[in-house]
Image (tube, rainbow, N blue to C red):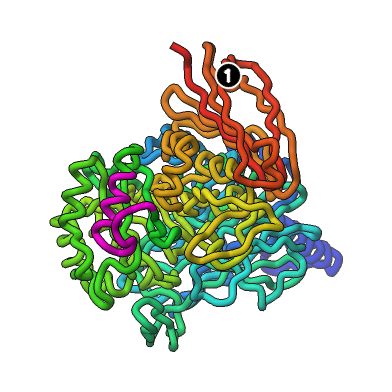
Amino acid sequence: MMIPGTRISPLLHLNKIISMKRKMAVFVILFVFAATAVAKDYRVSSPDGKITVTVKDGPGLIWSASYDGRPVIADAAAGLRLSSGFLPGEKEMVRKAVYGKIDQVLTPVVPVKRSAIPDKCNFMTITYKSGISAQFRVYDDGIAYRFETALKNTIIVSNETADFRLPEGSLSWYPLEDSFMSHNERLYVYTSADTLAEKHLASLPSLFVVNGINVLLTESDIDDYPGMWLRGAGNGRIRGVFPPCPEEERLRSDRDVQVIKAKNYIAETRGTRTFPWRTFIVSPDDGGLIESDLVFRLAAPCRIEDTKWIKPGQVAWDWWNANNIYGVNFRAGINNDTYKYYIDFASKNGIEYVILDEGWYKKGTVLESIPAIDVPELCRYAESRNVGIILWVVWKTFWDRIDEATALYEKWGVKGIKVDFMQRDDQPVVNFYHETMRKAAEHHLLVDFHGAYKPDGAGRTWPNALTREGVKGLENSKWSRDITPDHNLMLPFIRMAAGPMDYTPGAMLNFERNNFTPIFNRPGSLGTRVHQMALYVVFESPLQMLADSPTNYMKEQECTDFIVKVPVTWDDTRVLDARIGDYLLIARKSGSEWFVGALTDWKAREMELDLSFLPAGNYSMEIFRDGINADRHAQDYSHLKQDVKPGDKLKVSMVAGGGWVARITPKQ
């Protein structure tokens, strides 16, 4: 306050101005420092501390991940584009971050890899003012994130951003696709991730090798939403893409429902919901991909109250072998006499189910069988022999009469359905899967999806959905040379990491590489007899097919006796030695027994089996191995038994395209 009549000297005035400027400078410095302190990164690590996810504090959602300090995912962008705008907003910052952990044990209704699944992770949930949040979970074996919205009414999702960049020099096992309409039965292209461009479309799961670390990308808990696919974007960038909602469809024959006009959005859904998990299995060793059950852990809990009726098992399958039975006094084909023959074979060998594949019903209706087939009579005959009947249906014909069909099949005594030819995973078709699983459960029907997208943990949510295709399996050997031992040694690390696969093993006609010819009605396999037998231990499917003719199995009863003893569910799984596409040695436990399976590619190989995983005690081991002449006659094998104990080390020898398989039983 200035006293009247006084004056401020010019020097004093100047000092005050300088002082004010200094204070302003300090204020600016403090403001910048405070802003920098607020604009921090958010981090969460796996329980073992090896995997770390970092989320930048906007604008938008940008994240990255490392393993033991090595970058594995960089500059990943995520968000939802709604008809009303982008979430989180392009200039939106994190409002808050909440941290927590999960530490529990899951008990699956149908144990695929193990009967008790540890579910342990650290998580971080970041929220934004716009009504969207993102949760990141970090496990010792991977990463997952998903969005959750709290918006009113129905929302239109125009697109989703799920883009990421791989460090230079990354490699890929890439399931290259032609379009969104696909059975997802692909070979894996091994290539540099830097070469993947816009034209390179891929289905999931896809595997990347980044700084020596395996990163398998897939998803879990897809519901009322389309599946995710990938496109390259150049220089190691990969972006998620999604099939749009169909506006106009065209039915060709009875099975191919093609989208001929699409809407300009991918989903119309409720505004308050969770979205699918974007899932990254991370493993420094190849075997970790097989051992991971991350997709199952992330899936929604079981929605079936009474699950006692759900019975996994093996299936005698008719289609692959073209009903090519012989040495009988009736005409083989799609008729009751043929299927009673299958039922008798299944009953004699303790096989739980027989499938009636394509041809049993009149084209255009799944409610009426052809004159040569009497389904209720076959169901009664099968039940009297402790065997169940499964029926194949085309999805669209089934979908049109789903309520009547499921009720009728239950009335007939049918135990399950094999639903085929969906070939899409846009939002309406994904919803068809859920409606099928739900209605099938209401009528105590098991489900096997063919012409299907990859598993997404649905076996946890709907445990009656035991298996699905979405794999380039043995059926292709009827018309191509694609199903090689090399291919079989990629599937466990890539496709099977997402969940069970109905590959349909069990060929009894086996050929060396130079002697194989595809034959549609009398098919065989590339690789040895024991390679096929070992697939029953290696490949996971709680509804496991025996693809060949019952006549062939009965002629090879020694091998059949072993195959039918292999369980379809497991209490524990341990990968003992593995390299993608080259070899695999795996042990699985069922009750007090252990089964060991080994496969090799087109290279003859010796491996060491260390039995240290066995509990204390004495054991008997039954072994099938490649015969001394299996390299020139692939059906040659040797069958032996020996006593073993924990800590023993055995030599596992395989010819090119060969295998080795054993059953280990405690001695009384």
Task: Report if residue 332 lies within the magenta region.
Answer: yes
- Residue position for label 1: 642
Is residue 647 shown above or below 280? above
**Amino acid identity at mark 1:** Gln
Residue 427: image location, x then y, percent: 39, 71
Q: Camera-side residue: 480 or 255? A: 480
Picture quarter containing residue 178?
bottom right
Q: Camera-side residue: 438 or 385? A: 385
Is residue 345 shown above or below 118? below
Residue 444: image location, x then y, percent: 22, 50
Q: Camera-side residue: 368 or 252? A: 368
State the residue at coordinates (70%, 67%): 237
In this picture, residue 616 sits left or right of residue 2: left
Q: Quadrant of the C terminus?
A: top left
Picture quarter containing residue 18?
bottom right
State the residue at coordinates (55%, 61%): 472
Can you name the residue that lies furthest to the right here? 11
Q: In which quarter of the image is the N terminus?
A: bottom right
Is residue 309 shown above or below 252? above
Number of numbered labels in the structure image = 1
Can you name the residue that lies furthest to the left here? 411
Instruction: Examine the rendering and report whether any part of residue 92 can be seen.
Output: no
Residue 349: image location, x then y, percent: 35, 38
Residues in magenta, as a range: 327-345
Instruction: Examine the rendering and report whether any part of residue 10 can be seen.
Output: yes
Task: Report if residue 180 lies within the magenta region.
Answer: no
